[in-house]
Image (spheres, helix red, strand yellow):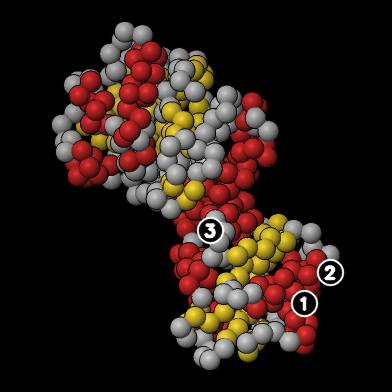
Amino acid sequence: MHKTLSVAKDTWWVGVNDYETDLFESLWPLPQGVAYNAYVVLGDKTAAIDTVKGPWFDDYFDKVTSALDGRPLDYLVVNHMEPDHAGVIGSLRCAYPDLQLIGNAKTLPLLREYHGIEEGVVQVKDGENLDLGGHLLAFYTIPMVHWPESMVTFDSATKVLFSNDAFGGYGAHEGGLFDDEKPRERWEGEMLRYYATIVARYSGMVQTALKKLSALDIAGIYPAHGTLFREDIGQAVELYDRWSKQETESGVVVAYGSMYGNTRRMAEAVCRGISEGGVKNVRLYDAARSDTSQILRDIWRYKGLVLLGCTYNTLLFPAVDALCTKLINRMLKKRVLGIAGSYSWSKGALDALRAFADTVKLEKIGPEVEVFAAPTEADLEQCVELGKNMAKAVA
Ligand code: FEO
């Protein structure tokens, strides 16, 4: 998509679709690309809201100049300093030497260290306004959603909240930008995958931000990635409220690590037990081969989690261990947890999973299953029992 689009009165989308980055933050796959949403608001003065990632300057700048239609750019609002949104600030300043940058106290050191910019910067406080003439922009800090300088910008003329990474999702725009232009199933999963990978650790701060912004009369939520919300902003707010409270649906994620298929058979037996227990939402993942961002997304969606690992060099199989580390980092709560391990010449996996369970303090569902070498029929029956107990716990 290479067109500047009107998205509200005097307001233009000047973002870009990125289909070339394979891994967001060099970590998370982008099978459907990602959009860097940026905006221009035209009052008596003109303002850009955020920029884009470095390689996309030409595309972005074409759209900015098209929106400005010969006018100068007076302000750049820097809602966030992560380089996917702030990557071309220096280039934009070169194009518009009189450009004033708007940021808060936490923005300024990052502007200096990333871009060497100290002049022409306006420091705003939480709740402070900038009058463009016809558009009054208000700035609200949302610390640690998901960086310390993160803030949002509210235009009281259009009632649009430029929400930064909050409410963002993976996936490039496929024609439509708005929630009323695409099916919910096309954006919700990618929004949750973005939440689980990027924002989840800061869920407590998301709750603080939602409370702070709840007093605003918002007609549109325009995030820095993914779908823009105008038809039903309530659905976006409700999802963010649920995810940040770690509220879940009935279902179980079963993630395993297996070298020769024995632990996989245990995982499959657990899944069979969950299914026999009447739970339809069962997601089975080989932790070594599956996209971790999809595992995290589904863990954030469902109440039940079962982790199984074989022992590798006296420790927990590395891919399962790495998943545990990510879950500890995201401060997973309000789930029920089952664990199982296998070993041959040395134990280790189940002990590590017990330590993980102690760290995350989730309610544990039994039985714990530990298998020597290949699972016997009795071992597999134990796994089925664990699955059935999980089904009861998530019903
Ligand atoms: Fe999309 Fe935190 O940058």
* Disc number for residue 292: 3
**Mark closer to the chain start, 3 or 1:** 3
Callout 2 touching callout 3 (CB < 8 Å): no
* N-terminal label among 2 and 3: 2
Asked if one can make out residue 167 in the rendered structure from this viewpoint, the answer is no
Provide the secondary structure element on which disc 3 rests: helix
Cβ–Cβ under 8 Å for marks 1 and 2: yes
Label 2 residue near ligand 1, CB within 8 Å = no
Which secondary structure, mark 2?
A: helix
User: How dense is the environment of label 1, judged by Cα within 10 Å: few (below 14), some, or many (20 and up)?
Assistant: many
Q: Residue at x 28, y 13 (%)?
A: 72
The residue labelled by disc 2 is: 276
Tell me the element at label 1. Answer: helix
Q: Nearer the viewer, residue 67 or 3?
A: 3
Residue 217 at x, y percent in the picture = 55, 30
Which mark, by number, is residue 384? Answer: 1
> Which residue sits at x=23%, y=20%?
95
Badge 1 amino acid: Val
Residue 145 vs residue 105: left or right? right
Quadrant where the C terminus is found in the figure: bottom right
**Does 50 sit above or below residue 382?**
above
Compared across the picture, whether 72 is left or right of 150 comes to: left
Q: Is 57 situated above or below 359?
A: above
- The residue closer to the viewer here, 77 or 227, is 227
**How far apart are the two marked residues, 2 and 3, measured between alpha carbons?**
27 Å
Mark 3: amino acid: Thr
Task: Compute the Cα span from label 3 to label 1.
Answer: 25 Å
Q: CA distance from mark 1 to mark 2?
A: 9 Å
Amino acid under disc 2: Glu
